Amino acid sequence: MNEPRTKAEWVGRRVRAREELRRGTLVVPKGAVLSVTGYRAGLRLLGDACACCGVRPVLRGVPEGLVELIHEAQHV
């Protein structure tokens, strides 16, 4: 899979957090896998649901440099 060249090409891709991501009281740990659901003034990321409570973290305005693209074959 190629690197995205436009903002629209980020949408639908899976990414891994290069470092801990913080937004208010929400903390997503380094290495967490998230889905890109939009791009406006940064990435809009949606995390997988928590196994015990079902909460799905949503982060907006995340710079591309804080995440790395992953290929589905790398996601376990």
Image (cartoon, rainbow, N blue to C red):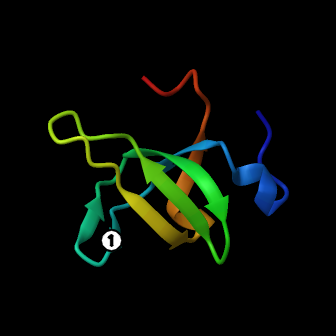
Horizontal and vertical percent for residue 30?
A: 34, 53
**Residue 7: image location, x then y, percent:** 77, 62
**For the view shown, which residue lies furthest in the front direction?**
54
Q: Quadrant of the N terminus?
A: top right
Q: Residue furthest right?
A: 5
Number of marks in picture? 1
Q: Residue at x 27, y 67 (%)?
A: 26
- The residue that appears at 71% across and 52% down in the rendered structure is 10
Residue 47 to residue 24: above or below: above
Quadrant holding the C terminus: top left
Compared to 59, does 18 lie above or below? above
Label 1 Cα neighbours within 10 Å, binned few <14 / some 14-19 / many ≥20: few
Q: Position of residue 34 (x, y in %)?
A: 47, 46
* Vertical position of residue 49 compared to residue 55: above or below: above
Residue underneath mark 1: 22
Q: Quadrant of residue 6 in the image?
A: bottom right
Q: Left or right of 4: which side holds 54?
A: left
Viewer-proximal residue, 68 or 23? 23
35 and 3: which one is in front?
35
* Helix, strand or loop under label 1: strand
Task: Name the spot of residue 66 as percent of width and height, x first.
Answer: 51, 64
Q: Amino acid at mark 1?
A: Arg
Q: Residue at x 26, y 64 (%)?
A: 27
Q: Kindly identify the residue that appears in the image at 48 percent across and 27 percent down.
A: 75
Residue located farthest toward the left when viewing the structure as drawn: 52
